[in-house]
Image (tube, grey):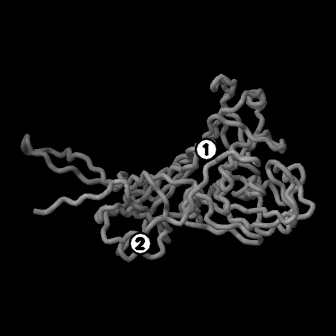
Amino acid sequence: MAINTTAPARTGEVLFKQETTAGEAIADPATYWPTSPRKGRFWDIAPAGLKRESEADQSMRPRVFADPPHILLGQKAVMTMKAFLHPLNQTGADATVTTEDDFGRLLKGALGGSFYGQTRKAGAASGTGATTALQVDSTVGLTAGGAIRVSGECRRIVSIDSGTTLTTDMDFSAAPALNTLVVAAGTTYLDQDALSNLADANHLTFAALFRGAHSEDQWQLRGGSWEITGFENLNGGEAAKIGLTLHGLAWAHVTGVASQGAGTETHPAANVASTTGGGLYCQATATVTRQYRHTSSLSFSPGLARQEIKSPFGIEGIAGYVINAGRSVLEFDTFYDTEFATGYHAGTTFYAGIQLGARLLLTFPLLYISEEPERTNVNGVTGVKVKMHCDEGSVTTSDLTRSRFAIHRFPA
């Protein structure tokens, strides 16, 4: 008698590849997937969204107990998962450009644009960054909208002022000493054309494979578009996480693909207390003095959902997935201060950054307070709940400087 096979349910891996043509056919999965796949360190992987729906056959039945089979409809291809918000598994060195890793390619697929900066050294007459421009040996490989880290503090670059000076959104705690490393981040940002135009050169689609512990628990998705569904653990003491959904055009149950092993991304450090900084900084526009906010809660919702483009000529009736709208919201609870109520009524604009440990930074170049700030009581301390929505930054032609938020990932 045959013995039923069993395998762990929470074990598996996800591999993905960028496609040349959205939804292109995969002739032989056993040959296709072992060749240079990108790997992700994911968990809570749910391939349950790979399904084919059906509906009852409503045609006339000649007999009362006749019950014909359901009519099969198009495929639904959705796979969800979670991941750490990984920093770059690289080491920053003078005149060295950070490079894209597997996780970076995923983020570019989700947001559309990416830029990888070049680490430099501080100059002899360097300033604090915002009040006085920061001097470096060269600004080659640095650009507005990117980010840098100096002695553990991370900031967004507002402008490149000359060949050797740049301005940041907020001051550092002190001007760096000569030859201090100014470490450049890899930055992922919103590219409007890539997200909203299926024909744009930067509109990326991916094939993905979920491979479970059971030899037959293998499912591949084609024509996939990544979506960031949310961020978790942005407040102190925990490692930041990111929710992901991959929307596809078609899927297939496959067999014969061998295990590829874990991804290469480094484990992220928790956002912990620091003598130099960490957590949320948020100031009114043009206020550049260094100030971090103590927050009892801190959350950010990108609010950018993928929408399917229906087409009878598309794969399974879908031509692809785009993002055309959505409100990105930053919320936090902090110590009570009337500046937020005053700013709400005056229509004051703000900027903000969330530094997660020493190697991750989220930046928001232009924020408006969306609702009347709410007075709160947190463990007997008077606080205020602030809800802000993100707008585009600079009105230049650069998607990087205009992006309503950006993810900056630093090397060690």
Split into 4 quadrants, where in the image is the C terminus? Answer: bottom right
Identity of the amino acid at label 1? Gly
Which label sits on residue 33? 2
The residue depicted at 64 percent of the width and 48 percent of the height is 271
The residue depicted at 65 percent of the width and 49 percent of the height is 356
Asked if residue 70 lies left or right of residue 38, the reply is left
Viewer-side residue, 262 vs 306: 262
Check disc 1 and report the residue beneath it. Answer: 237
Does residue 139 appear in the picture of this structure? yes
Residue 394: % across, % down: 76, 51
Q: CA distance from mark 1 to mark 2?
A: 38 Å
Q: Earlier in the sequence, mark 1 or mark 2?
A: 2
Q: Give the vertical position of 201 relative to 285 (above or below).
A: below
Residue 165: % across, % down: 87, 61
Identity of the amino acid at label 2? Trp
Viewer-side residue, 51 vs 244: 244
Dots 1, 2 in contact, CB < 8 A: no
Mark 2 is surrounded, within 10 Å at the Cα level, by few (under 14), some (14 to 19) or many (20 or more) other residues, namely many
The residue depicted at 56 percent of the width and 58 percent of the height is 267
Please name which of the two marks, 1 or 2, marks the residue nearer to the observer. 1
Find residue 63 and report its image quarter. top left
Find residue 35 and report its image quarter. bottom left
Asked if residue 172 lies left or right of residue 242, the reply is right
Asked if residue 331 lies left or right of residue 247, the reply is right
Residue 254: % across, % down: 31, 67
Residue 358: % across, % down: 69, 54
